[in-house]
Amino acid sequence: MAGGPLVNHDHPPATVATAASGRAPARVTGVLTTIFNCFALNAALVLACLPVVTIPVALRAAVVTLDRWRADGEDRVVVEFMLTLRASRLRSTTASVGIPIVAALLALGEIRFFASAHTAAKWPGVALSADGLLLSLASAGYAVVLAARCSGLPPTTIWWASASLTVRNLIGASPLLVAEIAVVVVVLLRDPALVVVCIPLGLVALIRHTAGRPVEKAIGLDPDRERDPADAGAVNSKSDRGATVG
């Protein structure tokens, strides 16, 4: 057999090189688009949270937007965020997500009160208040994801489900949720200017990831596969009929 260079006649070298060079700009464009979308969605989230009372609705809208971005490839994130924000049930979402947040703030106030006391109830009061703070923070994380993925559930059901998930995941997701929220809050309190570098959106993404697996198990979906729009519709139809989360 005569020796010589092997030539791939199906894919000539020039064609392969051209295809490879064409993929490189596409990858760079995809990365730049993702970065731009993250900063744009973070800015929209921060602006939506400025009135303070809209924080629960804004957090839910951010989770819904991230879910659709991942599952459906919907990269018009700001448009999706604004549409979700406008379509949200303001009173229901505020009650569902806002009550655990208010409970956490009250627990923090109790910690400060007992810490400054000079009575025998000082340390027991601090310990009980700290427990309440941890449980409230974890419940708030679960409530955000539940409100995003089971929009038809009444607030009382979301509260009960959030508390149940918090207790059932005391070894695992719940402490991690508390740590994530606490670290980000401390960082932002030390330097509020960091809100512009996607830290608020990063917190929402962490909550979505950490609380998402227990929530998906609770509502009967497989957490190891991407959510399908049909699944979301099935869950919301159950919610509209008043189905409870076990």
Image (cartoon, rainbow, N blue to C red):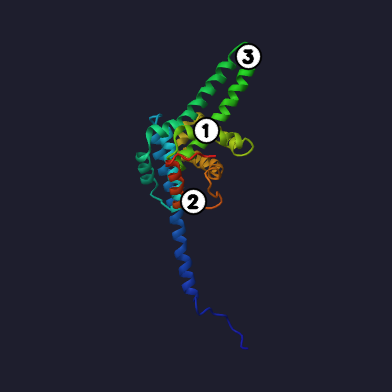
Q: Nearer the viewer, residue 215 or 48?
A: 215
Q: Point out residue 245 in the picture as x, y percentages from the top left corner.
A: 52, 39
Lower sequence index among marks 1 and 2: 1
- Cα–Cα gap, marks 1 and 2: 24 Å
- Cα–Cα gap, marks 3 and 1: 30 Å
Task: Tell which residue pokes out farthest to the top in this image.
Answer: 119
Amino acid type at mark 2: Arg
Quadrant in which the C terminus appears: top right
- Residue mark closest to the camera, 1 vs 2: 1
Kindly identify the residue that appears in the image at 62 percent across and 22 percent down. 127
Q: Label 1 crowding class (10 Å Cα cut-off): few <14, some 14-19, many 20+? A: some
Q: Point out residue 26 in the picture as x, y percentages from the top left corner.
A: 44, 60
- Residue mark closest to the camera, 3 vs 2: 2
Q: Nearer the viewer, residue 140 or 112?
A: 140
Dot 2 corresponds to which residue?
A: 227
Lower sequence index among marks 3 and 1: 3
